[in-house]
Image (spheres, rainbow, N blue to C red):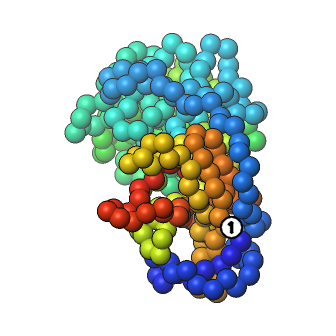
Amino acid sequence: MRTYHPGSTRSRFVLAAVIGASALGAGACARPAAVGAVEGLPPAVTSDAAGSSASVVAHSPPASGSSLPPGWRRCVNPVENYSIGYPRNWYTTQIRPEEVCAQFHPSRFTIPLESEYPLTALNAKRVPALPSRTDTEFERTLRWEKTTVAGRQAVRFETASTGAGLYLAGTRQYGYVIRLGDGLISIHTTAEPGETRYAAWKTVVNRAARTLAPAHRGCVPIRPGTGFYEAGRVATKELRTPTSRCTTISVSDIVDPANPTDRCQTFRVGLWPLVDGSLTYTEPVTACGSHRTVLARNVPDNTEFLVLYDVDYIDPDIQTVRFKVWR
């Protein structure tokens, strides 16, 4: 790779003299290397239906070590990077893409716009911290214990609402907060007083918690936004590698919309952290068409980077190339 000195490290770069191959720095696990290999594409994630009042489920093969109970299916949230199993005859829906696979219930339900979310039998969401061990104004802690779920660190909890918050007094919540990668996910059920299915829902939560897994078995694609143009190259906006098993940065589905027969372009990757005040750039690689072409390997999770491509023309307008970035 080559290291270049950007004029502004977050938004612009200037082509400078090559100062030799360099590593990512002390924070990197391994040095990403530019290559030109073409990889096969993984199976696409699909949805059964769309809309906030219908069952919307993204499906994926179970991750290794997280098999499903008989009669269950897996729901995948690629935005929040988790997947979870749930009973096949249950329903799930959401309003926003990042909320897919967050709520499940044995009967159909809707999420009203501009209102409170309904209470459902099975819930999954990312949380910033572990549940409280002590009573609060809003709830009493009935259970709090450290445990492991499918080999992952977790806390099992159960609370009862005091009635001072959104929930009726006596509303129960039971579940787990589980560490997944660098974050925490809560898998829980919530039931109002008198709900006769609460014990059964707790059993579902116990089973669902053991199915939790990362969404990404491999690399997943995005269509990046355009960041800037300078010195014959266009750069994407800043991107970040997710926490996943993917260790490469690749491009595919390359086309110049102004000239659809032009399916090839020269790419490189600019990576943080800075080395001597500079981004580290991979060697240029020519990529074509729908095939996935690797630009960098051995890229750690949560690495910040840009993808840049050389332009073929700037008149009458700067060339704009559409492509996917796999990371």
Secondary element at tag 1: loop
**Residue at screen point 25% across, 31% down:** 112
**Above or below 178: residue 172:** above
Looking at the rendered structure, the number of numbered marks drawn on it comes to 1
Query: In this orientation, does residue 38 appear?
Result: yes
Relative placement, left or right, of 143 versus 40 is left
**Above or below 20: residue 86:** above
Quadrant (top left, top right, bottom left, bottom right) of the N terminus: bottom right
Q: Nearer the viewer, residue 221 or 81?
A: 221
**Residue 258 placement (x, y as % from top left):** 38, 48
Answer few, some or many: residues within 10 Å of disc 1's Cα (few below 14, many 20 plus, some between 14 and 19).
Answer: some
**Residue 304 placement (x, y as % from top left):** 57, 65
**Above or below 249: residue 88:** above
* Amino acid type at image mark 1: Glu
**Residue 94 placement (x, y as % from top left):** 38, 32
Q: Nearer the viewer, residue 10 or 61?
A: 10
Q: Nearer the viewer, residue 123 or 321?
A: 321
Q: Nearer the viewer, residue 148 or 169?
A: 148
Q: Which residue in the rendered view is the most extreme toward the left?
A: 114
Relative placement, left or right, of 102 versus 85 is left
Relative placement, left or right, of 36 versus 198 is right
**Above or below 176: residue 15:** below
**Residue at screen point 61% across, 63% down:** 268
Relative placement, left or right, of 116 versus 146 is left
**Residue 12 placement (x, y as % from top left):** 46, 76
**Residue at screen point 65% across, 78% down:** 3
Query: In this orientation, does residue 180 appear?
Result: no
**Residue at screen point 60% across, 64% down:** 269
Residue at label 1? Answer: 283
